[in-house]
Image (cartoon, grey):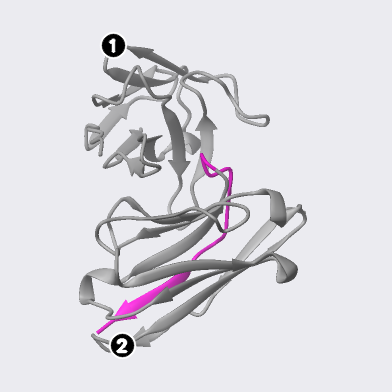
Amino acid sequence: EVQLVESGGVLVQPGGSLRLSCEASGFTFTIYSMNWVRQAPGKGLEWVSYISSGSSTKYYADSVKGRFTISRDNAKNSLFLQMNSLRAEDTAVYYCARDNPPDVWGKGTTVTVS
Amino acid sequence: SYELTQPPSVSVSPGQTARITCSGDAFPKKYAYWYQQKSGQAPVLVIYEDSKRPSGIPERFSGSTSGTVATLTLSGAQVEDEADFYCYTTDNSGNVVFGGGTKLTVL
């Protein structure tokens, strides 16, 4: 079964840091680009970041540029999001999603900045 | 980057046709994609490349574009189709854009 499982979401204070992880299974992770997409409580979807299959290309939303870093470990079928200088407006459910357009999504992990 | 505009809500009775629009300068240069997100669940891709349906998506879901407007049509809407719907595209710089979302009510 194709699956993405996010982890690492917790309650953190403003200005703090957090690292989210996403473990992939059931497909050849190394050939797919990946994304992080977030959804603030009661709000719509907001794309956060993209990474190509070989990590050579990375894109970020303006709202997180300079604060968040996307990375992946293809040997461990894992995607990461390092989040620094967190703000209240970063509070959201964070989804990892496969490919562009995203065709497989995880269930999300909740980050609360307060 | 592009902006995509959707109506906040659309309401239909069961069996009626629901149409959800997504307007933006990205179209028709870029493809439109549509996601359905039911309450408490992750989004599901229901239309890709303007009008194609992924496997497993019911035939009552269809998509089209005309000029700068992409439209998701749900023919014969069912109560279980109630959800938030989001359009999506990408720009030439690799940035991803989601529309603001449309809440579909079927009652």
State whether residue A94 is above or below residue A100.
below
The residue carrying pointer 1 sits among few (fewer than 14), some (14 to 19) or many (20 or more) residues within 10 Å by Cα, namely few
Amino acid at dot 2:
Gly
The CA distance from mark 2 to mark 1 is 45 Å
Instruction: Pinpoint the chain carrying mark 1.
Output: B
Residue at x-position 45% and y-position 24%: B77
Contact flag, marks 2 and 1 (Cβ < 8 Å): no
Residue at x-position 37% and y-position 14%: B65
**Magenta-colored stretch includes residue A105:** yes
Residue that label 2 marks = A16
Seen from the viewer's position, the closer of residues B97 and B22 is: B97
Q: Where is residue A95 in the image (x, y as percent from the top left)?
A: 48, 61
Image quarter in which the C terminus of chain A is found: bottom left
Residue A9 in sight here: no
Asked if marks 2 and 1 fall on the same chain, the answer is: no
Q: Where is residue A91 in the image (x, y as percent from the top left)?
A: 30, 72
Residue at x-position 74% and y-position 69%: A75
Which image quarter: residue A3? bottom right
Amino acid at dot 1:
Gly
Residue at the extreme front of the image, as rendered: A56
Q: Position of residue A88 (x, y in %)?
A: 22, 76
Q: Give the range drawn in magenta.
A: A100-114
